[in-house]
């Protein structure tokens, strides 16, 4: 009695296949009625769970199979549990098999998850239909049999599932004026994709052309075109791509010239505008000074008209006779 060794596994046309000691053994060996494996006189070891791979990748919307099986000498029905451990939540059950009954737990996976084969076939592979990005995580399978012994941890297996998301259709933009001699930047961005998509610009018409750094930034999705010429006109296509797929958008670049007449007209209009501005401000200054001068003259005239002559003392307005009389009187008194 010794432990069965596997060198390769595969699933073809819905049939689970394992290569055992160089010999291909298909799903029939897992059929009901086998007490463990008795192949060419070799009996399997005690209860143990095996996986075909520790990591499974699936594209969103497709089917994912997490390959697992167990070996046991017992004819008792096993107790099988599949749990999902995600980074943002505690582990939870998604699928169980107990007393001959399959139970799909109340999770987002319920309408899409199940066993790929009958559990009694010893093939306990998990299948997820129409995968979603949120299905990604660490799936743990545990098998227990009432009268079967197992080594510590041998009845548990872990498979990591990563659901890839193709890039969404990107958007392309032209930044700048495509005139001869000018510089412009083409940008390309996709709002969705796992892993993050890379971007590749190329000109498809009239002459195919590919671009490389530093003109092109694959991570940011930008393409810088400098010192434009008429020959650089054409259709520029951006492809957003990751492991799950690709999508594209395009920009039609038409490089135009700036005519001499347009330059002269622009210069004339600019000069006229500058002259008009100077005249406008000059008139404002002259008007301001004139208004200020007129205001000062009005104030001076008002001061002259409103001025009051100084009052003459009473004694200064009396007749000279009174003065003489008072003088004579004073003289008489003195004598």
Image (cartoon, rainbow, N blue to C red):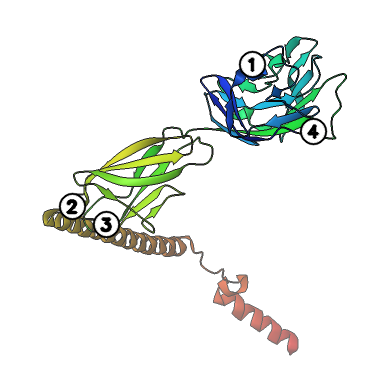
Of labels 2 and 1, the one closer to you: 1
Q: Is residue 72 visible?
A: yes
The answer to which of marks 4 and 2 sits earlier in the sequence is: 4
Q: Tag 2, which secondary structure?
A: helix
Q: Tag 3, which secondary structure?
A: loop
Of labels 3 and 2, the one closer to you: 2
Q: Is residue 139 visible?
A: no
**Residue 221 vertical placement versus 67 (above, below):** below
Do tag 4 and tag 3 residues touch (Cβ < 8 Å)? no
Residue 116 picture location, percent across and down: 62, 18
Q: Which mark is residue 154?
A: 4
Do tag 2 and tag 1 residues touch (Cβ < 8 Å)? no
Q: Residue at x 63, y 34 (%)?
A: 21
Q: Which mark is residue 117?
A: 1
In the rendered structure, the answer to whether residue 23 lies left or right of residue 170 reads right
The answer to which of marks 3 and 2 sits earlier in the sequence is: 3
> Residue tagged by mark 3?
182
> Residue tagged by mark 2?
231
Quarter containing the C terminus: bottom right
Of labels 4 and 2, the one closer to you: 4
Q: Residue at x 13, y 54 (%)?
A: 259
Of labels 4 and 3, the one closer to you: 4
The answer to which of marks 1 and 3 sits earlier in the sequence is: 1
The answer to which of marks 1 and 4 sits earlier in the sequence is: 1
Residue with the most extreme bottom position: 335
């Amino acid at each position: 009695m010794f432990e069965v060794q596997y060198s390769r596994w595969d699933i073809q046309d819905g049939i689970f296949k394992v290569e055992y000691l160089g010999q291909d053994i298909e799903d029939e060996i897992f059929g009901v009625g086998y007490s463990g494996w008795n192949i060419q006189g070799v009996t399997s070891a005690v209860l143990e769970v095996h996986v075909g791979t520790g990591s499974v990748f699936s594209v969103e919307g497709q089917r994912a199979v997490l390959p697992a099986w167990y070996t046991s000498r017992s004819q008792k029905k096993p107790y099988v549990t599949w749990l999902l451990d995600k980074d943002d939540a505690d582990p939870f059950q998604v699928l169980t098999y107990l007393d001959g009954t399959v139970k799909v737990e109340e999770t987002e996976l319920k309408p899409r998850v199940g066993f790929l084969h009958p559990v009694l076939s010893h093939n306990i592979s998990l299948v997820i239909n129409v995968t979603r990005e949120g299905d990604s995580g660490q799936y743990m399978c545990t098998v227990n049999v009432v009268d079967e012994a197992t080594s510590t941890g041998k009845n548990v297996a872990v498979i990591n599932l990563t659901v890839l998301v193709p890039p969404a259709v990107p958007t392309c933009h032209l930044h700048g004026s495509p005139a001869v001699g000018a510089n412009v930047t083409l940008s390309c961005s996709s709002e969705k994709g796992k892993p993050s998509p890379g971007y590749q610009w190329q000109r498809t018409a009239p002459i195919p052309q590919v671009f490389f750094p530093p003109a092109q930034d694959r991570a940011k999705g930008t393409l810088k075109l400098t010192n434009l010429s008429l020959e650089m006109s054409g259709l520029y296509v951006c492809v957003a791509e990751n492991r799950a797929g690709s999508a594209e958008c395009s920009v039609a670049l038409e490089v135009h010239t700036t005519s001499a007449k347009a330059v002269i007209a622009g210069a004339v209009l600019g000069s006229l505008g500058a002259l008009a501005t100077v005249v406008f401000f000059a008139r404002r200054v002259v008007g301001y000074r004139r208004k200020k001068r007129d205001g000062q003259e009005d104030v001076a005239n008002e001061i002259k008209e409103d001025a009051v002559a100084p009052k003459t003392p009473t004694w200064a307005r009396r007749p000279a006779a009174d003065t003489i009389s008072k003088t004579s009187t004073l003289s008489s008194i003195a004598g």
